[in-house]
Amino acid sequence: FDIVHDNQGLGIGLLLIRSCGVPMVATIHHPLSIDVRNAVAQATGPIEKARRLIYYPIFMQEFVARRLDRIITVSEASARMVELAFAVPRQQMDVIYNGIDTDMFRPLRVAKQPNDIIYVSNSEDRNKGAPYLLQALRYLRDSTDYRLTFVDRPRQQLKLAPRLLRRYGLSTRVRFTGRVTTPQLVRHYCRAQMSVCPSLYEGFGLPAAEAMACGLPVVATTGGALPEVVEDGVTGILVPPADAHALAEAMDTLMR
């Protein structure tokens, strides 16, 4: 090969390839050290904290990243975090934003569902902020007639979100779609009134960009690169990460 490109893996085997004289380039969406920090902060006990620390190969990522010929990041925020976490010089990195296929993700002439909120992510990953979204919806439960479309795995394969929905008395307000095709996802976006991206950190924020391409306003946090995707007060509303009250207020604003 003339060049080898790695997407976020940063495994030690890349250095074996590079030792053969093949230039090595990697795309880093964000350092795993951010996932570790957020996961440990939300862990409920010492055993869970230890398990989360062991799970992430953060030291391997740093070791490999420092030895690559070139690094691509998907946002300025990601580039700053790679520089900080891995001590990689900024001049060794190029920012190339993720793209959206606007022939696919575009407004459709479908009936809007009033006060329908769409969440597209892996709710089992606490970095994606689903607990804060559900807590925010609990605050709005008695004042607003809303529905949440949850685009994730099938409900029976999830643990965290169904448990919180039962605790908060929100089970009848949420519809789980299970896995969907891209055309189905576009239709879900276009039926909704808003999209919510409550992530604690995003290296880019693809669901936010997809939603905007479909004409939706977005409630998102200021975590990571989301302010590079969502323009506060123009294409959506930005709130601090891990702030359920701020999420609730922003969603209420867009529903009024």
Image (cartoon, grey):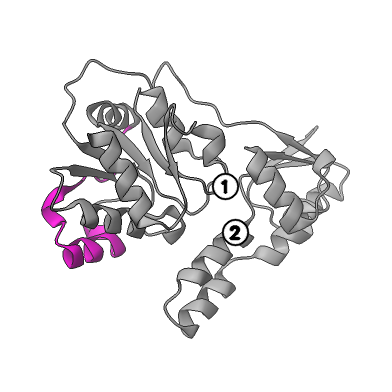
Residue 120's x, y, as percent? 35, 43
Task: Describe residue 44's horizontal placement relative to residue 89 as left or right.
Answer: left
Mark pair 2, 1: CA separation:
10 Å
Query: Image quarter for residue 171?
Result: bottom left
> Which image quarter is the C terminus in?
top left
Q: As shown in the figure, which amino acid type bears the numbered disc 2?
A: Ile
**Decide: marks 2, 1 in contact (CB < 8 A)?**
yes
Marker count (numbered): 2
Which of 209/226 is in front?
Answer: 226
Q: Alpha-carbon neighbours of circle 2 within 10 Å: few (<14), some, or many (≥20)?
A: some
Task: Describe residue 203's horizontal placement relative to residue 45 as left or right.
Answer: right
> Which image quarter is the N terminus in?
top right
Residue 26's x, y, as percent? 71, 43
Which residue sits at x=46%, y=53%? Answer: 241
Per the rendering, the mark at residue 224 is: 1
Q: Alpha-carbon neighbours of circle 1 within 10 Å: few (<14), some, or many (≥20)?
A: many
Which stretch did the figure color magenta? 156-181
Which residue sits at x=16%, y=53%? Answer: 141
Query: Is 174 inside the magenta-drawn segment?
Result: yes
Residue 125's x, y, as percent? 42, 58
Query: Which residue was labeled with disc 2?
Result: 34
Query: Image quarter for residue 23?
Result: top right
